[in-house]
Amino acid sequence: MYNPRDFLLLFYALFWAQLLATSSRYNAFPTAAILNPSETDGRSKRLGRLVASVFLLNLFPIVWLWFLWSVIVVDHSASFAGLAGAALAALSIFGVIRLYHAIVASSGCVNTFYTPDEQSKYEIQGSYKLERPHYSHWVPGLIYMTVFPLAAYFVGRL
């Protein structure tokens, strides 16, 4: 018999894969450009982006899964409430891409991690080049990462 933690792993894996697919528009892992000797311009920006991406898109979600696993999702027999709680907890992973955007690609930080050519090539600020301050991404990201786990905590215990 499956328990809610099994469902957490399933949903989390699916949502994490979607998170990584969504992050491709930011060219989060520019390893080829870093290693290419002819692309020395902006190498330090790419290296900084790679380090931030490894931490925020690879390592942080592992720690977040551990938190959800050990604190939020209960380990008891399968029920609809347990399944719903696990699904709600897994939805919180979408907050990570918002936090990533706030740190790496918001208007105040984009020049730290991207060259001007990369900013236009990847349309980091969108096609309309709107000013997007960091808090416009922090707030939704933190909402995802607080509301969904709290809802999962209470729903999973019904």
Image (cartoon, helix red, strand yellow):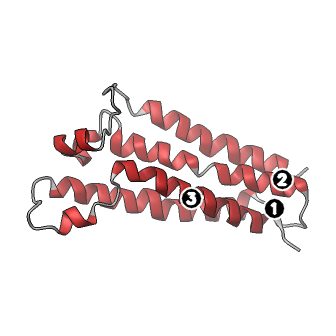
- Residue at 21% in and 53% down: 45
Distance (Cα) linking label 2 and label 3? 21 Å
Residue drawn at the location 69% of the way across and 59% of the way down:
11
Q: Is residue 56 depicted above or below 37 in this figure?
A: above
Mark in the foreground, 2 or 3? 3
Which residue in the structure is indicated by mark 1? 74
Q: Classify the position of the N terminus by image quarter.
A: bottom right
The mark lying in front, picked from 1 and 3, is: 3
Residue 35 location, x and y as percent?
18, 69
Q: Residues within 10 Å of mark 2 (few under 14, many from 20)?
A: many
Q: Which residue is mark 3?
A: 16
Lower position in the chain sequence, tag 2 or tag 1 = 1
Secondary structure type for disc 3: helix
Q: Nearer the viewer, residue 14 or 156?
A: 14
The span from disc 1 to disc 3 (Cα, nearest Å) is 21 Å
Rendering coords of residue 110 (x, y %): 28, 40
Q: Residues within 10 Å of mark 1 (few under 14, many from 20)?
A: many
Marks 2 & 3, CB-CB < 8 Å contact:
no
Residue 156 disc label: 2
Percent across and percent down for residue 15 are 60, 56
Q: Report the number of discs.
A: 3
Corner quadrant of residue 10: bottom right
N-terminal-most mark, 2 or 3: 3
